[in-house]
Amino acid sequence: MRKIQMVDLQTQYMQIKGDIDRGIQEVIDSASFVKGKKVQEFAEHLQEYTGARHVIPVGNGTDALQIALMSLGLERGDEVITPTFTFIATAEVVALLGLTPVVVDVDWETMNMDVEAVRRAITPKTKAIVPVHLFGQCANMEELLGIAAEKGLYVVEDACQGIGSVYTFSDGRKAQAGTMGEIGCTSFFPSKNLGCYGDGGALFTNDDELAARIKAIANHGMMVRYHHDIVGVNSRLDTIQAAVLDAKLPHLDEYISSRQTAAACYNEAFMGNEDILTPGKNAQSTHVYHQYTLRLSERVAPYRADIQKKLADKGIPSMVYYPVPLHLQKAYQDARYKEGDFPVAERLSGCVMSLPMHTCLDDEQLRYITENVLNAVKEV
Ligand SMILES: *Cc1c(COP(=O)(O)O)cnc(C)c1O
């Protein structure tokens, strides 16, 4: 059996080695490492794939989120609502820009932003909502967009884990993760659903004016060469990374279905086990399983580290995404929040466990993982 990894990028590379190597070599031959033509080509292909009117590639997903918030003309002290159960980058950029992160609890089943909590968190200072499509499943976009429209708020989607996920509105209209709010942000970090071989990210928007501002901000606030109308940053997708991504994009749907097949196998093995709760589904969204994150029962959750150790001893890695919610992180301590304020997120932090998830898990590996997870849970 092949070694089991959380993410197996070597096997995936071997499957498309020819295309990747050729793409990278072309960039080296052209010596056009920054703003090479592959960057624009890839952006166009991603535009076709997602249906977004504009795709603006940048240096990474965190930059994408920061640039998105910079482009909205927010002012110091304006409030931005994010879930408390997410990767830190979502709130980090809010804090860095001198905006005020307001965190809300999440839904126990989908682990995504709790819509009622968002409603309660809105104040006259609220300017934007940043839903995260956590683990690869869209947040409750129809209701969030409804609230935003009613209250005049921006929606910036953190689709860093959600690229390729499709949301169906109740009128039947379908949209890709990242293309529903004013702006969507994604990451091409190697382990993400569409990952490059270093750092990368992109913004999506359907708004022409916002697209122009975003492009300028990502390029030192420059609209006309060496004329800087707004304060910007330097954030670009390297041409070599664009070449890798352009070789991988045609396989994204196939990658997603491999992940879904692996997730279905996990779901089936754990179905009915009272100590293992499989990921809850939002009926309006597909799940692209950036992570397969199960929840341990109250009985076994206190022994999560022991379960992980048992699995590690069998050569099965596992991870805890995320062990500490934002409101309990040291850097984000805030007089407004205390332990106990967001019970669902706090409970999730104590009981979630992510299993190996990537595009090259085979039946033998999946069987070995599920058998050992079931045993480890039973034994504690
Ligand atoms: C990965 C990730 C980011 C940041 O992306 P980088 O490319 O690593 O900067 C932001 N938000 C979420 C939810 C992520 O998973």
Image (cartoon, rainbow, N blue to C red):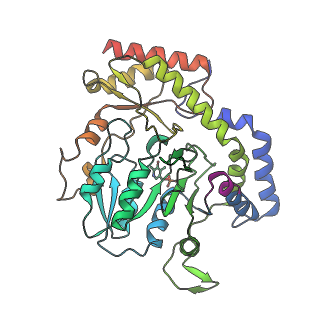
Name the foreground residue: 59 vs 83.
83
**Residue 9, visible in the rendered structure:** no
User: Where does the C terminus fall, quadrant-wise?
Assistant: top left
Residue 162 within the magenta-colored segment of the rendering: no
Residue drawn at the location 76% of the way across and 52% of the way down: 24
Residue drawn at the location 31% of the way across and 70% of the way down: 78
Percent across and percent down for residue 232 are 51, 76
Name the magenta segment's main secondary structure.
helix
Residue drawn at the location 48% of the way across and 59% of the way down: 181
Q: Quarter of the image holding residue 125?
A: bottom left
**Where 202 falls versus 196 (above or below)?**
below
Give the residue furthest to the front: 171
Name the foreground residue: 291 vs 120.
120
Query: Is 179 displayed left or right of 352 in the figure?
Result: right
Query: Is 298 displayed left or right of 160 in the figure?
Result: left
Percent across and percent down for residue 331 are 29, 56
Percent across and percent down for residue 361 are 60, 26
Percent across and percent down for residue 218 are 56, 71
**Where 5 falls versus 116 (above or below)?**
above
**Residue 4, visible in the rendered structure:** yes
Q: Quarter of the image holding residue 155?
A: bottom left
Name the foreground residue: 35 vs 152.
152
* Residue extent of the magenta highlight: 45-52
Q: Give the number of marks.
A: 0
Query: Is 245 displayed left or right of 346 in the figure?
Result: right
User: Where does the N terminus fall, quadrant-wise?
Assistant: top right
